[in-house]
Image (spheres, rainbow, N blue to C red):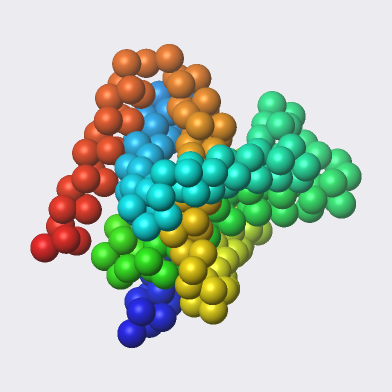
Amino acid sequence: MAFLDLLFGALTVFLATSLGSAGILLFNGRKIGRVDYSNIISFCAGVMAFSAMEMFGQSLIYAGDLVATLSLLVGFLVFLVLERSLPHLHFLVRKTSISDSKKKAALIAGTITIHNLPEGFAIASSFAQSNPLGWLVTSTIAIQDVPEGTLVSAPLACYGIDCVRSFKFGVLSGLIEGVAAIFGYIFLSLVKEVIPSALGFAAGAMSYVILAELLPDAFKGRSWKVALSFILGVVAAIGISSFLRF
């Protein structure tokens, strides 16, 4: 039954990302305003921040302070190293084109990996702990995945890739996230002793995405609305958590 919930969770985030990626077909060259972009990203960061805190809280309860804290730190550092090691599209966001097709493919692959592995593993570790926590994390990530799907596809279109192909890359990012969740869950089912540590690791990985990816982009908007959007995201996640606990 738990695995079935996990499969539905993986399908949920895949569909959410695909839905967001379909936005590139609607915009088709039109740009999202800087303020709107910042507010959306900040809201998503708030949603994910609460989810990460919930996972870390569970890790503290079941793994203890020391193990949970070390797991959080390791998760953060692993994805810091990954981002610095893998080619990453955000580093070239100001360029209008990437002429080398191999370099372009590597950048796309690196971007998709960075954005989706932490979230997929977070879903896996949360469902491995309990279904309510799993659905909380899945729901908050799915909310974040809708705009992220658009924001994965949109830069590709800016680099000269047609909208249909950009949409397909966005769908691929959702697929990677779902597959990461499934294989992560299978692994954790075989070694259940590491689930509490895995929750701390996933919380650290998500914290890196929030602090290094989402919030720096969001606060480029330099608006008080960005801070408000973050808090509203946290409040929305609290509402989801309360609903799932009844």
> Residue 165: x percent and y percent?
65, 58
Report the quarter where the N terminus lies. Answer: bottom left
> Residue 13: x percent and y percent?
43, 63
Q: Residue at x 18, y 48 (%)?
A: 239
Rendered position, 134 above or below 224: below
Residue farthest toward the bottom in the current orientation of the protein: 1
Is residue 86 in view from this perspective?
yes
User: Which one is in front, 35 or 197?
Assistant: 197
Is residue 148 in view from this perspective?
no
* Quadrant of residue 225 within the rendered picture: top left
Q: Is residue 173 left or right of residue 142?
A: right
> Residue 74: x percent and y percent?
60, 45
User: Which one is in front, 141 or 58?
Assistant: 58
User: Which one is in front, 96 or 184?
Assistant: 184
Q: Residue at x 55, y 69 (%)?
A: 184
Report the quarter where the C terminus lies. Answer: bottom left
Rendered position, 18 above or below 185: above
> Residue 15: x percent and y percent?
43, 66
Q: How many marks?
A: 0
Residue farthest toward the left in the current orientation of the protein: 246
Q: Residue at x 79, y 53 (%)?
A: 105
User: Which one is in front, 191 or 227?
Assistant: 191
Q: Is residue 75 left or right of residue 241?
A: right
Q: Is residue 42 left or right of residue 187?
A: left
Q: Residue at x 70, y 45 (%)?
A: 82
